[in-house]
Image (cartoon, rainbow, N blue to C red):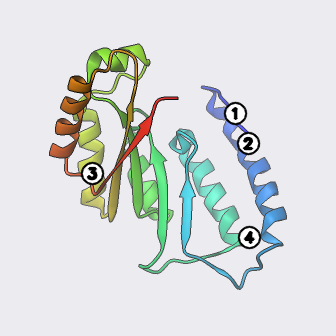
């Protein structure tokens, strides 16, 4: 697993160019006649990438692979709601994504502060509601249990709050 950790968005394009070089090598194993119906952008916060870089990456994939555009495709992307601006979800939709996964982790402010991930409930709900309005067909919320200051009771409260948001899917991970 290769990682680049930075807050400098100008580092994104050189990284994406390397990703596309690797994809070009891998694409030779598949050929353009094989349809790609499932695609996932993950690894934390791919929406950290600026809009033009996301467009460049998807265009590069489109040149290398037979990306499907039909309704039966499953193109998903992980989103940190704190990184969403007014263009993020429309851009992802235009790029062909139809499923999103929002990193929530926990809704308890004490837990959020302990893990340096302050994210008010209304921020998550705003992103979720906008995604529904745009037409994303599946919205997942990621939770993590075992975080500092979590208790069974506080995590149960987080579950109640999250279930009120009615996500299509809920993923729960252990803090490791």
- Whichever of labels 2 and 4 marks the residue nearer the N terminus, that label is 2
In the image, which is nearer the foreground, mark 4 or mark 1? 1
- The answer to whether 164 appears left or right of 135 in the picture is left
In the image, which is nearer the foreground, mark 1 or mark 2? 1
Give coordinates of residue 161: x percent, y percent: 18, 36
- Whichever of labels 4 and 1 marks the residue nearer the N terminus, that label is 1
The residue that label 3 is drawn on is 130
Q: Secondary structure at mark 4?
A: helix
Residue contact between numbered discs 1 and 2, judged by CB atoms under 8 Å: yes
User: CA–CA distance between discs 4 and 1?
Assistant: 23 Å
- Whichever of labels 3 and 2 marks the residue nearer the N terminus, that label is 2
The residue that label 2 is drawn on is 15
- Whichever of labels 1 and 2 marks the residue nearer the N terminus, that label is 1
User: CA–CA distance between discs 2 and 4?
Assistant: 17 Å
Q: Secondary structure at mark 2?
A: helix
In the image, which is nearer the foreground, mark 1 or mark 3? 1
Q: Residues within 10 Å of mark 1 (few under 14, many from 20)?
A: few
The residue that label 4 is drawn on is 64
**Quarter location, residue 123:** top left
The residue lying at 28 percent from left, 48 percent from top is 128
């Amino acid at each position: 697993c290769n990682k680049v950790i930075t807050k400098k968005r100008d580092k994104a394009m050189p990284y994406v160019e390397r990703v596309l070089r690797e994809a070009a090598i891998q694409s030779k194993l598949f050929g353009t006649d094989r349809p790609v119906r499932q695609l996932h952008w993950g690894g934390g916060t791919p929406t950290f990438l600026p809009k033009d870089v996301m467009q460049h990456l998807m265009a590069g994939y489109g040149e290398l692979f037979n990306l499907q555009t039909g309704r039966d495709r499953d193109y998903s992307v992980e989103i940190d709601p704190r990184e969403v601006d007014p263009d993020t979800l429309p851009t992802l939709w235009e790029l062909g994504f139809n499923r999103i996964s929002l990193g929530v982790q926990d809704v308890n402010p004490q837990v959020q502060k302990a893990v340096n991930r302050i994210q008010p409930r209304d921020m998550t709900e705003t992103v979720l509601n906008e995604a529904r309005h745009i037409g994303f067909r599946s919205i997942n919320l990621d939770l993590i249990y075992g975080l500092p200051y979590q208790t069974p009771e506080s995590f149960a409260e987080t579950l109640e709050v999250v279930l009120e948001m009615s996500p299509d899917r809920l993923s729960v991970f252990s803090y490791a």
